[in-house]
Amino acid sequence: MNSIYDFSAIGIDGHARRLADYAGQVLLIVNVASHCGFTSQYEGLEALQRTYADRGFSVLGFPCNQFGRQEPGSEAEILGFCELRYGVSFPMFAKVEVNGDKVHPVYRWLKSRKRGVLGTQAIKWNFTKFLTGRDGQVIARYAPADTPQSLRPDIESALTRGKPV
C-alpha cells in the first residue's frame, strides 16, 4: 500500500468505504472515543471540518475502545452521541483497533509512516491524530493533547501544497 487512498474501512453505517473516495484531499485521521477526557475535541474537529471542507479537507473519525474502554457503545450509539452532542458532520467509521494483533490496516500503515514520541509506533491514547496530504502521504502525527485548533497552521500549509488546478 502506497498511500492512504489504497485502503478501505467500514463506515459507521456498516457499509464498506474506499478511502480513494477522498483522493486529492487533506485528511485528519483521528481515533476517537465518547467517554474520554479528550472527547470535547469533537467540537474542535467539527470546527476544522466546517472551516476547511470546501478547500478539500476532511476529518475521518475512527472510534476505538482500546483505551480504558472509553468507547463501549454500538456504532449507532456512537453516531447518535457525536451528532447530538457535537453536531459532527465529518465521516465516521466503525470501531477499530489501533494497536495489537487486530490493528486495522489503516492504522498499521499510518503508524509505520509516522512514529510517535521516542520513535514508538504504538498509539498511546484516544485522539491521536494523523495529517495526510493531497498525495495521500502522512505529513504529521499529533498527540492526544494537541488540540484541533493548534493544527490549523499545518492544515492550511497542507491545503496549499499540491493544490489541484
Image (cartoon, rainbow, N blue to C red):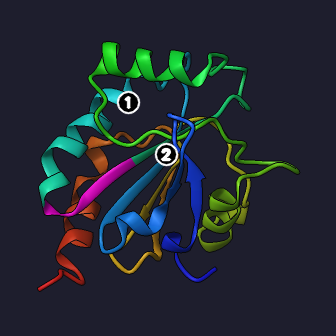
Give the secondary structure at mark 2. Answer: strand
Q: Is residue 163 above or below residue 105?
A: below
Quarter in which the N terminus is drawn = bottom right
Q: Amino acid at mark 1?
A: Gln
Q: Quadrant of residue 106?
A: bottom right
Residue in the image at 70% along x and 47% along y: 98
Quarter in which the C terminus is drawn = bottom left
Q: Which residue is mark 1?
A: 41
Q: Is residue 25 magenta?
A: no
Of 23 and 15, which appears nearest the observer?
Answer: 15
Label 2 environment density (alpha carbons within 10 Å; few <14, some 14–19, many ≥20): many
How would you classify the magenta stretch by its main secondary structure?
strand
Q: Amino acid at mark 2?
A: Val
Q: Which residue is mark 2?
A: 30
Task: Please provide percent x and percent y for residue 100.
Answer: 84, 48
Label 1 environment density (alpha carbons within 10 Å; few <14, some 14–19, many ≥20): many
Q: Is residue 121 visible?
A: yes
Residue in the image at 47% along x and 63% along y: 19
Q: Is residue 57 magenta?
A: yes
Q: Is residue 60 above or below residue 76?
A: below
Task: Please provide percent x and percent y for residue 157.
Answer: 22, 70
Residue farthest to the front?
A: 15
The segment highlighted magenta reads 55-59
Residue farthest to the right?
A: 101
